[in-house]
Image (cartoon, grey):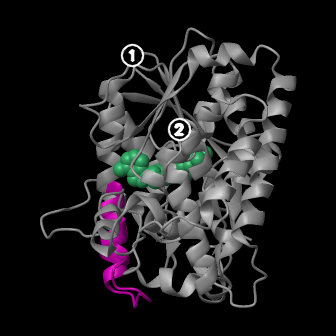
């Protein structure tokens, strides 16, 4: 098996230059490999309630809080907050934090998880009983039925029952409304024929479905257990209310309107990967139940998030500024791509990430540390060293590259392996310091 650096020897000179330039900063730290995925969160109270499978592990954040020596005097920022793993872990260490996400369901979950801390013992169970009394008689809530998957995902009676539950939850006062919406979103996979597998929301007709009332009750029990667990693990948990994270639905490429309490002293984050994955498809049911009224509004979100997916739009004038990205785009022109839009996605991705990195540079305190998980990608045999390209962009934006930690190697698909040989692709954590 070749390592990734050897893989570049057969490729363009810009990528080889990057590999040589950063060779001394590239280190394997394969213990981090299991922390870059959400799997570890299945055991973490409250974080386990909603499956946001693009999350990284709670322990990943704790590792970098320790590694950077962060204390309660710091201020942590997650510019791609997802379900709020960084914010939650920071709060439990007593460190104030702020997070932004452009996907409404992600920002919602990150906020709602923290609302649970305002709940008293027994509130959830009592509210469940009250809701159950109302559900039969209430008119169903409207949902975005013009989105195709909504017609395929559910049995008719289950969809009607879910819409009634949603209508009853809509009438709750805060914070119970957000908490029950969170529990409601967390049962949509188990009550539908969908499965958030791999890159898509798949339809699995053979699935055994849960009935909404039972599924919500299970979640109520889980949430109650988690709250007890957290209170037991952290007897001073009431103190967390003083450093509740701020969560904002916003765009990390445009931080001008975000009110930070002060310049953040650290970023611990993971952006979308340039791997065609479309968050608005995987989280389509949640979006259609609550955040959009129709397909047009869903598309507006799709085209508003970072351009990491295949439907990303790129104008003629947009050109990638980094020479290694230009090299990849040039080489791909002579190849037969299974999807001709891949070069657009790559161009859009690097333009957007560059914008984001410059925004962070303007926002962070001097000396601030950054830890960001990134995944290198490969299309038709062309490797893109996302970790090194973004590190070079960061240097131009005013960061020092401290190290690039290789967390794991991913194999390529069996099809690619047959054609181009087995060249593992790095998943790395880039570590930078604001000058
Ligand atoms: C890999 S996930 C982050 C997961 C997070 N670390 C966690 O533990 O949940 C990347 C996130 O970036 C968000 N995102 C995409 N475009 C964005 C943008 N322009 N501004 C802010 N967030 C964005 C996606 O919605 C997604 O939640």
Total count of labels: 2
Q: Which residues are magenta?
A: 328-350
Q: Is residue 166 above or below residue 228?
A: below
Q: Position of residue 60 (x, y in %)?
A: 70, 38
**What residue does disc 1 label?**
261
Q: Position of residue 234 (x, y in %)?
A: 81, 20
- Camera-side residue of 14 and 240: 240
> Of callouts 1 and 2, which one flags the residue occurring earlier in the amino acid sequence?
2
Residue pushed farthest left? 317
Q: Is residue 399 above or below residue 383?
A: above
Q: Quadrant of residue 178?
A: top right
Q: Name the image quarter holding the N terminus.
A: bottom right
Q: Quadrant of residue 324?
A: bottom left
Residue 72 belongs to the span the image colors magenta: no
**What residue does disc 2 label?**
111
Q: Is residue 145 above or below residue 267?
A: below
């Amino acid at each position: 098996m070749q390592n990734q650096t050897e893989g570049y020897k057969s490729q363009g000179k810009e990528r080889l230059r990057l590999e040589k330039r950063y060779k001394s900063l590239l280190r394997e730290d394969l213990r981090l490999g299991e922390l870059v995925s959400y799997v570890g969160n299945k055991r973490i109270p409250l974080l386990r309630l909603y499956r946001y499978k693009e999350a990284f592990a709670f322990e990943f954040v704790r590792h970098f809080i320790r590694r950077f020596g962060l204390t309660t005097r710091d201020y942590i920022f997650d510019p791609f907050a997802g379900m709020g793993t960084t914010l939650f872990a920071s709060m439990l260490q007593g460190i104030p934090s702020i997070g932004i996400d452009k996907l409404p369901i992600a920002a919602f979950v990150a906020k709602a998880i923290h609302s649970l801390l305002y709940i008293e013992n027994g509130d959830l169970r009592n509210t469940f009983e009250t809701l159950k009394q109302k559900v039969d008689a209430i008119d169903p809530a409207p949902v975005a039925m013009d989105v195709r998957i909504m017609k395929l995902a559910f049995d008719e009676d289950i969809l009607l029952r879910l819409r009634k539950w949603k209508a009853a939850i809509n009438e709750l006062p805060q914070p119970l409304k957000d908490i029950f919406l969170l529990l409601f979103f967390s049962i949509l996979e188990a009550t539908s024929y969908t499965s958030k597998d791999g890159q898509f929301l798949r339809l699995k007709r053979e699935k055994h479905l849960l009935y909404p009332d039972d599924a919500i009750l299970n979640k109520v029990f889980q949430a109650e257990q988690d709250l007890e667990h957290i209170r037991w693990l952290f007897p001073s948990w009431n103190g967390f209310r003083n450093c509740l994270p701020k969560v904002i639905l916003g765009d990390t490429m445009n931080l001008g309107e975000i009110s930070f309490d002060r310049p953040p002293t650290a970023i611990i984050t993971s952006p979308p990967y340039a791997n065609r994955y479309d968050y608005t498809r995987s989280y389509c049911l949640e979006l259609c139940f609550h955040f959009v009224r129709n397909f047009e509004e869903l598309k507006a979100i799709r085209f508003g998030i970072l351009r990491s997916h295949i439907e990303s739009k790129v104008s003629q004038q947009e050109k990638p500024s980094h020479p290694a990205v230009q090299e990849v785009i040039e080489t791909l022109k002579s190849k037969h791509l299974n999807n001709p839009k891949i070069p657009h996605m790559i161009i859009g991705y690097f333009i957007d990430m560059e914008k984001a990195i410059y925004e962070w540079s303007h926002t962070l305190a001097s000396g601030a540390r950054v830890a960001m998980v990134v995944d290198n990608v490969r299309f038709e045999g062309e490797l893109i060293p996302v970790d090194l390209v973004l590190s070079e962009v960061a240097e131009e934006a005013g960061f020092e590259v401290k190290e690039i930690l290789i967390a794991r190697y991913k194999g390529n698909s069996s099809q690619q392996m047959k054609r181009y040989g087995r060249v593992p692709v790095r998943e790395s954590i880039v570590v930078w310091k604001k000058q």
